[in-house]
Image (cartoon, helix red, strand yellow):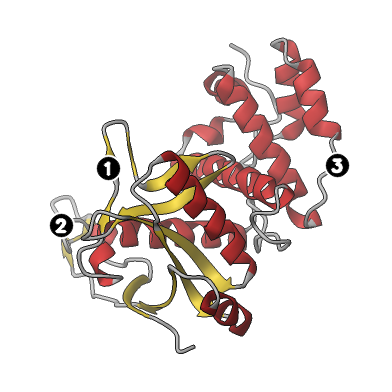
Amino acid sequence: MMVQADQTEALSLRAAYRFAAEHGLEREAEEIRTTPIDWDLKIKSSVRRGYMCDLLEKHGLLNLFRDEHWSFGKTLGGEQKRKRYLSLKERYEDFLAGRGGDEAPEGDADSDAGEQQFAVEADLRDFLASHLPIIEPGLRLHQQPDRTGVEYPVDDGRIDILAVDKAGRFVVVELKVSRGRNRTIGQLLYYMGWVDAHLGNGPCRGMIVAREIANDLAVAAQRVPGVSLYRYRLSVSVEPVSTQTAKGGRSVASRCNGSAAWCALPARPTRLRPPAV
């Protein structure tokens, strides 16, 4: 197997278009390459990368593409980029459908800021999914035999967290790492309507969790029954890591919380408070 010279950390669109054409997907790749993307200029290429990842995955070609053109894609960092590309694609489609507001996410998928925001967003989602009672006592993650309530798929979108309250009613939780705005209400209501129509046991409730709650969002939420707003706060703790000299003179880190890799953790939400309205 001959590895091409276009290996980069970011997925090479030129290599992806050429590879797709070589495997009978020239029309689809050309459509992705030429279709205008009316969004933030900084992330247009990353959105196209998301469409190419999706195309290659659907045809079972992504692993072969990684082998031949994107070896970084086989690493943990490459997997994070792939998820970020697909996330931007989904957000762009939400934007086109009028579900996600008109603001593009901050930072390109291949920039430090973009990767950091995506990591924090995923970290917040995963933490809350495992600690839902800190939002509301008795709240638990929805479970099905083939999926969980994390990134729950619906028509043309994904619910950040689909939970169930102590009364057995569904609760849709929408997360915003940055500032929650009133346009988030429309996206949340769509998800709530979908849950009522397809999963039943309605009416369900909705929650928006954001670092900051804009005044216009608080005003809009007053007019929508069944929707609650929450503001999260972050707490960072730093613990010393002791070292010892192992045989052979190598310096090794002692275990902390079971693994040295987990001694310095990302910021985690410690408390959620409904904003004053």
Instruction: Please give the residue where the numbered disc 1 appears in the rendered image.
Output: 143
Specify few, some or many for label 2: CA neighbours under 10 Å numbering under 14, 14-19, or 20 or more: few
What's the distance in space between the residues labelled 3 and 1, CA to CA?
39 Å
Left or right of 85 in this view: 241? left
Give the mark nearer the N terminus: 3 vs 1.
Answer: 3
Q: Amino acid at mark 1?
A: Gln
Instruction: Please give the residue where the numbered disc 3 appears in the rendered image.
Output: 36
Please, what secondary structure does the residue beneath circle 3 have?
A: loop
Please, what secondary structure does the residue beneath circle 2 have?
A: loop
The quarter holding residue 25 reads top right
**On screen, 15 above or below 98?**
above
Left or right of 171 in this view: 255? left
Specify few, some or many for label 1: CA neighbours under 10 Å numbering under 14, 14-19, or 20 or more: few
Q: Amino acid at mark 3?
A: Pro
* Horizontal and vertical percent position of residue 178: 55, 71
Instruction: Please give the residue where the numbered disc 2 appears in the rendered image.
Output: 258
Discs 2/1, front = 1
Q: Residue at (81%, 45%) from the top-left corner?
A: 37
Discs 3/2, front = 3
In the image, 156 versus 62, the foreground residue is 156
Left or right of 78 in this view: 100? right
Q: Are marks 2 and 1 in contact (CB under 8 Å)?
A: no
Give the mark nearer the N terminus: 3 vs 2.
Answer: 3
Discs 3/1, front = 1
Q: Residue at (69%, 11%) from the top-left corner?
A: 23
Judged from this view, the residue extending furthest toward the bottom is 276
The quarter holding residue 180 reads bottom right
